[in-house]
Image: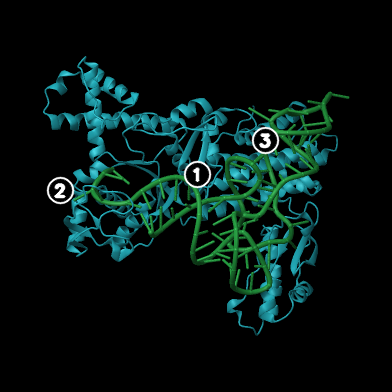
RNA sequence: GCGCCUGUAGCUCAGCUGGAUAGAGCAACGGACUUCUAAUCCGUAGGCCGCAGGUUCGAAUCCUGCUAGGCGCGCCA
């Protein structure tokens, strides 16, 4: 099969350029890049190569462009090539020149846009990792959706993605959780309990208490000594919470390959091993940290402690691995965790964190560099906060106050597709204003319906064709060059752009591009649909348009699948 | 005080890592269904791209400074 037209044109131009450069230092020689001009008058493709070349050849850019055009041998689909503006070469194709793509799409089906390069580099993708001390809130949902779509995207580009959830089931938060549940259990037994400020509020604590009581009763706990009781209730509560979280994730079609427990790192001695190794490598010394900046610390006392020399590897300050009570810090466990990923064979890790963990990136990367020599690992994607509003009024999220809006509430009201799609419509760097009322609205304001409607509409036409006894021709027998209308050409260009879009989305870790793309593709389709009636008397034109519809449906479905959104056949 | 993210149309956001006249959706206004799904389409209007310098043929995009908002800065995870 011939390479895509774009590449053919590109090569033709490159050859012409190369022949101009004989005898010139080719080190700085620019390469030909074809772009899609915004203005229609500027043709189908534009090349700016004459401009950078002008400096090198010491000629005026328009003149350079002329020389190039005199040399170049374009493929036959090129109708004309003109010089415009300061020295752009604008290339115009014959109408219907690129419509072969429809056949390619039909041939490749689900695989259209995917790259089958079997180098299959494994990537460990860690996301969500919400603390098992409460249900997932809407902010977690954003990270979850972004992570899952990124995983799909990278998979489509040939990487072997291992999706992982890190359970923070160790540390004081778990003791607080256990204690909160125990207090509720006592209260449910009719005891008069006062709740300290430190205890978690929220009805789910009561639910967990009830669940434990119904399964295990009360007396067994009453008779335990306090530390055993807290430990036992802690484990049960974490389990209950994780069950809840898994359900929330399942409701938006997210599954993980692995749930990794922090506690196992402590219990298996991995954390201590790590500290010993660092001691042996001379990376730990005794020192005193300066007081924290930026906020009042009333009870700060300088304390001598053992510090990890992370500054040698790019960090701002050295970090303690042990608390004064002799237990490991969260940081110690976290680098043990990432070291564990490395030992499991992952040299490439991506973590998706909330923006509130931004200050944590350098220290983990520094630690990993010290341990493995790897640069910039894990690669961290920070997802900015979600601001909840209800009818435009800010809605404060606080797990402590028990006023947070859970993900499952929103999913129940809005539906999985709307939640997933909405979260994908913005770059992760921008904060997300999620209005509960607007998200609930099942009208045109929700772009997910616009896209899904395009798919359903295509299916409706295909059904109609079938009911009228129209047989779809096999793609290779269809004359796609008949698709010459403006709308048809725009739609073809959108279909053509899909693999390129996936490529930039994957390399730049920007899965939101898929969502933006589906909206543009849907728009191009709706416009085509409106101006080009499909079921008509002209048999060959009808077949060409039917093929266009099938190809569009295929690409819409491929893209929506990556987003985890359904492509309905009816709406 | 320091670090990271953001500032583009009334609102919510794109702008393909420097290209030609800055684009969508919503809201506003005006049109289009006896014909395949009007959850749609077509048009009009709306912009000191936060501010000021700099880099060059060319800047919303790159650099510097300022400004506004968000997040973070102990042995909390």
> Residue at point 69% right, 39% down?
A550
Q: CA distance from mark 3 to mark 1?
A: 29 Å
Query: Residue A364: x, y in percent?
Result: 33, 55
Chain shown in cyan: A
The answer to whether marks 3 and 2 sit on the same chain is: yes
In the picture, one chain is green; tell me its letter: B
What x and y, as percent, mark residue A527? 75, 40
Camera-side residue of A471 and B76: B76
Q: Name the residue beneath numbered marker 1.
A: A431
Looking at the image, is mark 2 or mark 1 nearer the viewer? 1
Q: Is residue A181 visible?
A: yes
Residue for badge 3: A454
Q: Are marks 2 and 1 on the same chain?
A: yes
Do residues under tags 3 and 1 come within 8 Å of each other at their CB atoms? no
Which mark sits nearer the N-terminus, 2 or 1? 2
Seen at 67% across and 35% down, the residue is: A454
């Amino acid at each position: 099969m011939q390479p895509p037209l774009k590449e053919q044109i590109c090569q033709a131009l490159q050859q012409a350029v190369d022949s101009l450069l004989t005898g010139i230092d080719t080190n700085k020689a620019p390469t030909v890049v074809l772009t899609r001009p915004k203005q229609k008058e500027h043709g189908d493709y534009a090349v700016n190569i004459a401009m950078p070349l002008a400096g090198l050849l010491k000629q005026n850019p328009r003149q350079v462009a002329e020389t190039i055009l005199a040399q170049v041998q374009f493929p036959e689909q090129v109708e004309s090539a003109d010089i415009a503006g300061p020295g752009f070469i604008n290339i115009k194709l014959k109408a219907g020149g690129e419509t072969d793509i429809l056949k390619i799409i039909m041939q490749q089906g689900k695989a259209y846009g995917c790259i089958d390069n079997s180098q299959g580099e494994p990537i460990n993708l860690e996301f969500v990792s919400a603390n098992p001390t409460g249900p997932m809130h809407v902010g977690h949902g954003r990270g979850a959706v972004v992570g899952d779509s990124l995983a799909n995207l990278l998979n489509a580009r040939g990487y072997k993605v291992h999706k992982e959830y890190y359970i923070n089931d160790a540390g004081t938060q778990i003791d607080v959780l256990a204690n909160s549940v125990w207090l509720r259990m006592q209260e449910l037994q009719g005891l008069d309990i006062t709740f300290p400020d430190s205890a978690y509020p929220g009805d789910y604590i009561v639910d967990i208490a009830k669940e434990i009581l119904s399964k295990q009763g009360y007396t067994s706990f009453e008779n335990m000594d306090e530390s055993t009781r807290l430990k036992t209730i802690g484990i049960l509560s974490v389990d209950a919470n994780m069950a809840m979280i898994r359900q929330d994730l399942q409701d938006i079609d997210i599954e993980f390959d692995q749930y990794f427990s922090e506690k196992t790192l402590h219990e298996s001695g991995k954390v201590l091993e790590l500290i010993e190794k660092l001691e042996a490598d001379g990376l730990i010394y005794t020192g005193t940290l300066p007081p924290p900046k930026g906020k009042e610390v009333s009870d700060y006392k300088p304390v001598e402690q053992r510090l990890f020399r992370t500054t040698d590897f790019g960090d701002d300050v050295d970090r303690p691995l042990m608390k004064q009570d002799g237990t490991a810090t969260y940081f110690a466990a976290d680098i043990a965790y990432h070291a564990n990923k490395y030992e499991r064979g992952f040299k490439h890790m991506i973590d998706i964190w909330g923006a509130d963990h931004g200050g944590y990136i350098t220290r983990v990367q520094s630690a990993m560099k010290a341990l493995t020599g790897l640069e910039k690992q894990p690669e961290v994607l920070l997802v900015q906060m979600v601001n909840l509003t209800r009818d435009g009024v800010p809605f404060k999220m606080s797990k402590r106050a028990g006023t947070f809006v859970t993900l499952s509430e929103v999913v129940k009201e809005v539906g999985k597709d709307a939640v997933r799609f909405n979260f994908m419509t913005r770059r992760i760097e921008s904060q997300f204003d999620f209005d509960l009322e607007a998200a609930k609205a099942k009208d045109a304001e929700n772009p997910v319906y616009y896209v899904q409607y395009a798919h359903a509409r295509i299916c409706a036409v295909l059904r109609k064709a079938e009911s009228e006894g129209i047989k779809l021709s096999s793609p290779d027998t269809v004359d796609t060059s008949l698709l010459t209308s403006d709308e048809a050409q725009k739609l073809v260009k959108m279909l053509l752009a899909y693999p390129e879009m996936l490529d930039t989305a994957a390399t730049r870790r920007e899965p939101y591009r898929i969502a933006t793309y589906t909206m543009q593709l849907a728009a191009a389709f709706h416009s085509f649909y409106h101006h080009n009636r499909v079921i008509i008397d002209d048999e060959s034109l009808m077949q060409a348009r039917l093929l266009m519809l099938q190809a569009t449906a295929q690409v819409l479905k491929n893209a929506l699948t990556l987003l985890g959104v359904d492509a309905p056949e009816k709406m």
